[in-house]
Image (spheres, grey):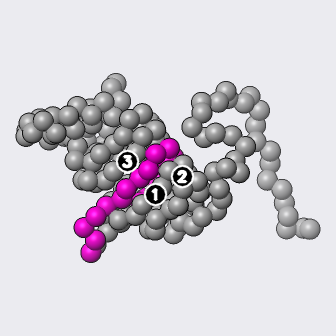
Amino acid sequence: MINVIYLYRLARFLYLKKIPVFPKIIQGIIFLFYNCHISYKAKIGKKTYFLHKGMASLILDYVEIGDNCRIGMNVMITGKTPYKKVAKIGNNVWIGPGAIISGPVIIEDNVIIAPNSMLLKSVPKNKIVAGNPAKIIGDVSELEYDIFKNMDFNEGLMPFLEDKTNK
């Protein structure tokens, strides 16, 4: 099955060439096959892609997403009343599954948004945010790995949680 980003790019191309009907038809096909709404009026940069083909995602009109971003499934980038503007997302942003970005926020470059976070405020570059509402919990430069690099999978299992109730 074709990745949703290719259909989006075709619809966006036709929209920019002022061909009126076909972008709407392609958007309908995207909704039918992927259960998502990715507006052809949104601007999505090069090498940005949707994980799991963008299943159940919502990208509103006029949202701007930079280059080399990763967007998880069930991500919603929406507006917020009474604001007319919508989100502007920088380059190298990783948005975890189930994250909601609401309103006219600016997300600068090299940001990680944890899964199921509710982002209501702008985020400076190189930060990691998580929670509902999202708060800054770390800095990307402190990570031991590059989240955008395809690493080899480890064979082992994660350790068990430690019981700190008896200490």
Image coordinates of residue 78 in percent, x first then y, are 33, 60
Give left or right: position of 14 versus 39.
left
Would you say the residues marked 1 and 2 are in contact, meaning their CB atoms lie under 8 Å apart?
A: yes
- The stretch of residues the image draws in magenta is 82-101
Q: Residue at image x 31%, y 61%?
A: 86
Q: Amino acid at mark 1?
A: Ile
Which numbered dot is residue 107? 1
| Residue reaching furthest to the bottom | 82
Q: Assign a secondary structure to mark 1.
A: strand
Residue 158 included in the magenta stretch of the image: no
Q: Amino acid at mark 2?
A: Val
Which numbered dot is residue 111? 2
Give left or right: position of 48 versus 143.
left
Which numbered dot is residue 65? 3
Give left or right: position of 19 versus 29.
left
Which numbered dot is residue 73? none
Disc 2 crowd, CA 10 A, few/some/many (<14, 14-19, 20+): many
The tag earlier along the polypeptide, 3 or 2, is 3
Q: Residue at image x 50%, y 62%?
A: 123
Disc 1 crowd, CA 10 A, few/some/many (<14, 14-19, 20+): many
Image coordinates of residue 59 in percent, x first then y, are 32, 50
- Residue 102 figure quarter: bottom left
Nearest the eye: 14 or 155:
14
Q: Assign a secondary structure to mark 2.
A: loop
